[in-house]
Image (cartoon, helix red, strand yellow):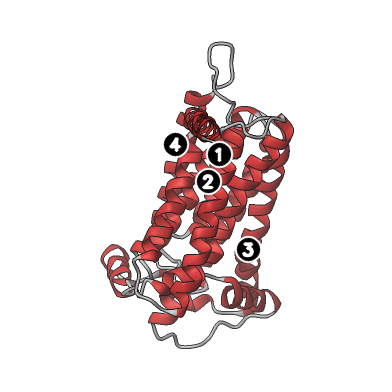
Amino acid sequence: MLEVTRNVATRARSTLGITAQNLAVQDAIALLFHAYLFVRVTIAPDSPDATVARRLALALLVVTTCSMVLTRGEVIRGARARALTYRLGLFVPMVLSYFEMRVLLPALHPDLMDHRLFAIDLWLLGTTPSVWMEAWNTKPVVEWLSFFYYSHFFVLIVMLVPALFFGRGRRLQELMAGGMLLVATGHFLYTIVPGAGPYATLAFAQPLHGGFWWNQVAVTVATAGAQLDIFPSLHTAWPAYFTLHTFSNRSYPPFRVLWPILGFITVNITIATMFLRWHWFIDVAVGLLLACAARAFAAAIAVREAQRGGMCDGRQPVWERL
């Protein structure tokens, strides 16, 4: 019995050692991010939201950790099964962390920072864009910008899902490493600088005069939005990051055509976030800065980790082929 226990302990140490050796930078970001959310909500005051958020945070942390051990620790021997498990175990919890915010942020009993964010806008611009954009409040403009605001979700799907399962090489490493930093940093800042946005803080002369697309945006935000997730504007950061990624890879045929399209969409989404009264200017500005930082980080990490799995490097490749 003692010998069996020793063997199990030896295997566990070996697996953990292999896991640590094979961890990529994006893996460490994901693990630290989920650990932070779990610790943060664990020490929050007890409440119904906190109870749900603690369960969600623990579940996402456990799923991510187990996925890393199974894949980076090479417990799963088959390369394709390991590659699929890694993709799902890394990507899905990060996506679900946004929906976790809906209960986690209120559970922290935050003091909303809207008046401070508005003060920054006043200092920078003399007002906030959503106020002077009231002059554009006509149905065609509202519908146009609502359409682009809503298109954000389709842009996310089109840019991330095919790359996750069919991408390879440096471009995949760059896209996902920067994306991981983007979402982890953005969600972390939500917990530090919570706010509801201009629509909940300022008095506007009239409601927005929209139609179908404005209704879709309003319903989506009300039913699926995290509500206090304004600083930074990830709604701006994501399309800006994708535009930078495609522009940097414009020598490749898909991106040669894609980058100006994404650039046009990004400009409209950026305007829409403020016009529709969801974000302060400073939210958007920091979102754009975060996109630039994530792109620079992604390029540096891709160079650093390009040799993983090569002849002189025994570590597991960052992205094994499916």
Residue occupying image coordinates x 48% and y 27%: 21
- CB-based contact (under 8 Å), mark 1 and mark 4: no
Callouts 1 and 2 close, C-beta under 8 Å: yes
Q: Sequence-wise, which precedes: disc 1 or disc 4?
A: 1
Which quarter of the figure has residue 228?
A: bottom left
Q: Is residue 70 left or right of residue 229?
A: right
Q: Secondary structure at mark 2?
A: helix
Decide: few, some or many residues near mark 3? Use Cα within 10 Å; few <14, some 14-19, many ≥20.
Answer: many
Q: Which residue is mark 3?
A: 148
Q: Position of residue 26 (x, y in %)?
A: 50, 39
Which quarter of the image is occupied by the C terminus?
top right
- Characterize the local packing of mark 4: few (<14), some (14-19) or many (20 or more) Cα atoms within 10 angstroms: some
Find residue 297 and name its label: 4
C-alpha separation, residue under disc 4 versus residue under disc 3: 27 Å
In the displayed structure, 138 sits above or below 144; it is: below
**Placement of 198 over or under 28, stated as above or below:** below
Residue 119 point in image, percent of width and height: 27, 70
Tag 2: amino acid: Thr
Q: Amino acid at mark 4?
A: Phe
Question: In the image, what residue occupies the spot 49% across and 78% down?
Answer: 135
Q: Is residue 263 above or below residue 236?
A: above
Q: In the rendered image, which residue does mark 2 sit on?
A: 65
Q: How many marks?
A: 4
The image quadrant of residue 216 is: bottom right
Tag 1 residue: 69
Q: Earlier in the sequence, mark 4 or mark 3?
A: 3
The foreground one among 88 and 138 is 88
Foreground mark, 4 or 3, reads 4
Q: Amino acid at mark 3?
A: Phe
Q: Position of residue 8 (x, y in %)?
A: 54, 34
Which image quadrant is residue 81 in? top right
Q: Which is nearer the eye, 82 or 231?
A: 82
